[in-house]
Amino acid sequence: MDKVTDGKPTLLYTENTDLMALTNSNLLRHGLGQSSATMLENELLHRLEAYIEMHGDYLEKTDGDDTRG
């Protein structure tokens, strides 16, 4: 997903990215690619990573129909 040209990941998402539209895996990649994160954000990213490893990314299995809200 990321292209490395100078040793740093190139993110595919910008500040205007709708984070709610990202799958869990893409959200994790986006969060890990940020230059800074608070202790809370870092902990939540690690928990999301563990969740994806245990249960998979259920958002990738949907057809885009968002029933969360």
Image (tube, rainbow, N blue to C red):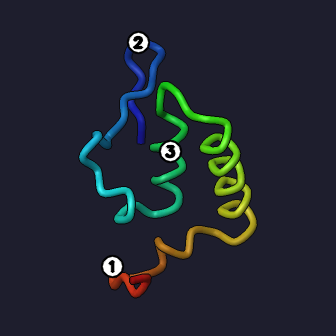
Kind of residue indicated by mark 1: Gly
- Residue lying farthest to the top in this orientation: 6
Q: Secondary structure at mark 3?
A: helix
**Location of mark 3 (residue):** 29
Q: Residue 5 or 36: which is nearer the viewer?
A: 36
**Viewer-nearest of discs 2 and 3:** 3
Q: Is residue 26 above or below residue 30?
A: below
Query: Between disc 3 and disc 1, whose residue precedes?
Result: 3
Q: Residues within 10 Å of mark 3 (few under 14, many from 20)?
A: some
Query: Between disc 1 and disc 2, whose residue precedes?
Result: 2
Residue in the picture at 38% in, 64% down: 20
Kind of residue indicated by mark 3: Arg
The percent position of residue 34, horizontal first and vertical second, equals 47, 32
Are circles 2 and 3 on residues that touch, CB within 8 Å?
no
The percent position of residue 69, horizontal first and vertical second, equals 39, 83
Q: Is residue 44 above or below residue 5?
A: below
Q: Secondary structure at mark 1?
A: loop
How much space separates mark 1 and mark 2, taking CA atoms? 34 Å
**Location of mark 2 (residue):** 6
Residue in the picture at 73% in, 56% down: 50
How much space separates mark 2 and mark 3, taking CA atoms? 18 Å
Q: Is residue 68 left or right of residue 47?
A: left
**Viewer-nearest of discs 1 and 2:** 1
Quarter of the image with the N terminus in it: top left
The percent position of residue 38, horizontal first and vertical second, equals 60, 35
Kind of residue indicated by mark 2: Asp
**Location of mark 1 (residue):** 64
Query: Between disc 2 and disc 3, whose residue precedes?
Result: 2
